[in-house]
């Protein structure tokens, strides 16, 4: 059923926007990005597609906002564990990071789409708003990473964060290939080419974090 009344107050608009994001998150758990439509989101929220455009003019803008929401939740989770976990080695931090990412599957599935899709069909103002939000959100996490991993040279927390994202974005699609590739990999002879996301991510993060902790002159 379509809702006929408009959200007029700022509070009502914020509530409606949150409802849209919640529905998008719910649908994201059971659909691939290419199969998920704005019409499906609008129908579940109880809006016309035209009304949905008033909040999110494109599919990319909707999922970029969802990405920010999911990323903020993950950062907060990571920061809490870093504060409780004391001093880490590169190996123990890699183990923690991989485990926490495993607790945020909605983010892990969306991360590969960020640069290739979500940031492709947004306005310069939208891109600036997203990057400004990110720049304002990461300082507490960067400080927490330096405290937890004291062997990490000054200024290397941001490269660590960027490369962690790049590894997730690259490894997850390899672990969840297209149906035709899945069928091919079911051949026991091709089993060595199957990528298990969690252990491969931990192994890759351990190598990354170890390398970043090497002294500059190494």
Image (tube, helix red, strand yellow):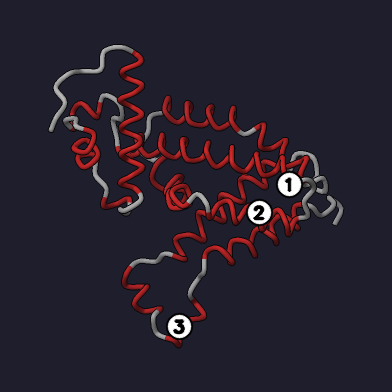
Q: Position of residue 122 (x, y in %)?
A: 37, 33
Query: Which residue is the site of mark 2?
Result: 96
From the viewer's perspective, is 27 left or right of 73? left
Q: Residues within 10 Å of mark 3 (few under 14, many from 20)?
A: few
From the viewer's perspective, is 141 left or right of 90? left
Q: Residue furthest bottom?
A: 189
- Residue at x 81% of width, y 54% of height: 214
Q: Position of residue 184 (x, y in %)?
A: 36, 79
Q: Position of residue 110 (x, y in %)?
A: 43, 48
- Residue at x 50% of width, y 70% of height: 195
Q: Nearer the viewer, mark 1 or mark 2?
A: 1
From the viewer's perspective, is 16 left or right of 95? left
Q: Nearer the viewer, mark 1 or mark 3?
A: 1
**Do the residues under discs 1 and 2 have CB atoms within 8 angstroms?**
yes
Choose between 207 and 127: the one closer to the eye: 207
Task: State which quadrant residue 60 falls in.
Answer: top left
Q: Earlier in the sequence, mark 1 or mark 2?
A: 1
Secondary structure found at label 1: loop
The residues tagged by marks 1 and 2 sit, at their Cα atoms, a distance apart of: 9 Å
Secondary structure found at label 2: helix
From the viewer's perspective, is 216 left or right of 133? right
Q: Which mark is residue 85?
A: 1
Task: State which quadrant residue 155 falls in.
Answer: top right
The residues tagged by marks 2 and 3 sit, at their Cα atoms, a distance apart of: 30 Å
Q: Which mark is residue 190?
A: 3
Q: Total of numbered circles in the picture?
A: 3
């Amino acid at each position: 059923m379509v809702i006929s009344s408009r959200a007029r107050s700022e509070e009502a608009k914020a509530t409606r926007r949150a409802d849209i994001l919640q529905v998008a998150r719910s649908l994201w758990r059971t659909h691939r990005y290419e199969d998920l439509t704005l019409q499906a989101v609008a129908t579940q929220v109880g809006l016309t597609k035209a009304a949905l455009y008033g909040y999110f003019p494109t599919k990319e803008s909707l999922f970029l906002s969802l990405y920010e929401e999911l990323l903020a939740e993950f950062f907060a989770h990571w920061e809490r564990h870093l504060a409780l976990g004391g001093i880490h080695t590169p190996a123990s931090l890699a183990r923690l990071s991989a485990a926490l990412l495993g607790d945020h599957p909605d983010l892990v599935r969306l991360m590969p789409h960020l640069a290739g899709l979500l940031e492709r069909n947004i306005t310069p103002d939208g891109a600036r708003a997203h990057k400004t939000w990110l720049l304002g959100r990461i300082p507490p996490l960067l400080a927490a990473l330096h405290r937890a991993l004291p062997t990490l040279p000054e200024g290397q927390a941001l490269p660590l964060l960027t490369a962690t994202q790049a590894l997730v974005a690259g490894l997850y699609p390899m672990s969840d290939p297209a149906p035709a590739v899945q069928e091919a990999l079911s051949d026991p002879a091709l089993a060595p080419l199957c990528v298990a996301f969690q252990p491969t991510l931990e192994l890759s993060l351990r190598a990354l974090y170890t390398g970043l902790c090497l002294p500059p002159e190494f």
